[in-house]
Image: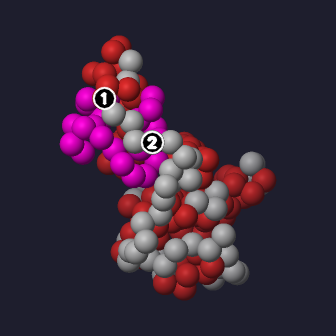
Amino acid sequence: MARTPTVTRDQVPEPLRAAFDAETAGSGGTIVGGPGSVMIHSPEMRHRANVLVTYLRDESSLSKKIQELVMILTARAMDCPYIWHAHGARARQQGISDAFVDALRDNTSLPALPAAEQIVGTYVQELCKTHQTRPATFHAALTQCGARGVTELTTLMGYYALLAFNANAFEIDVPASGPEPNMPL
């Protein structure tokens, strides 16, 4: 069980109720799982975060395959079982190889990816591990994705790190079953 109870409308300060209502309209007035169940404690913040993720998912220059690669690499770097649960199977569906997904999940040596994906993978792993990228790595990502793409790629990593921090800090429950084995820690 998460470390905080499910927030209800009557627990939200009056000035934030419109944001709460907008953010919970599609889920029956509450959010009971995932990082959103934590973020709704600050409804306006959640609203603003959702504007960003909607852009990143639906309007970004990054393909869905690259987006899912970034998400699972970030989930592993952040040791976040919840994000892994949400995106491991989706990465496979977008064409990330089973061998890569399995090795990433199990935290073992990763097989090489196709060239375009490998550039992104290296960029994400360097930035997550050292908080910087080597000049050659940045140049390769810039050449492949352009300045807009690298900006969106980096921001997507940051967004999923934000979700991971919330999921991990508040101990968000990972559903017991799903299409992907749980990520060992």
* Left or right of residue 9: residue 146: right
Q: Which residue is mark 1?
A: 9
Q: Secondary structure at mark 1?
A: helix
Which amino acid lies under the numbered mark 1 shown in the image of this protein? Arg
Residue 64: horizontal and vertical position, in percent?
38, 61
Residue 30: horizontal and vertical position, in percent?
30, 41
Residue 158: horizontal and vertical position, in percent?
57, 45
Which amino acid lies under the numbered mark 2 shown in the image of this protein? Pro
Residue at x-position 54% and y-position 46%: 3
Residue at x-position 31% and y-position 29%: 9
Q: Is residue 168 visible?
A: yes
Q: Are marks 2 and 1 in contact (CB under 8 Å)?
A: no
Foreground: 41 or 99? 41
Q: Is residue 144 visible?
A: no
Q: Residue furthest bottom?
A: 99
Q: Label for residue 5?
A: 2
Foreground: 11 or 124? 11
Q: Badge 1 local density, few (<14 within 10 Å), some, or many (20+)?
A: some
Q: Label for residue 103?
A: none
Q: Which residues are magenta?
A: 20-42
| Quadrant of the frame with the C terminus | bottom right
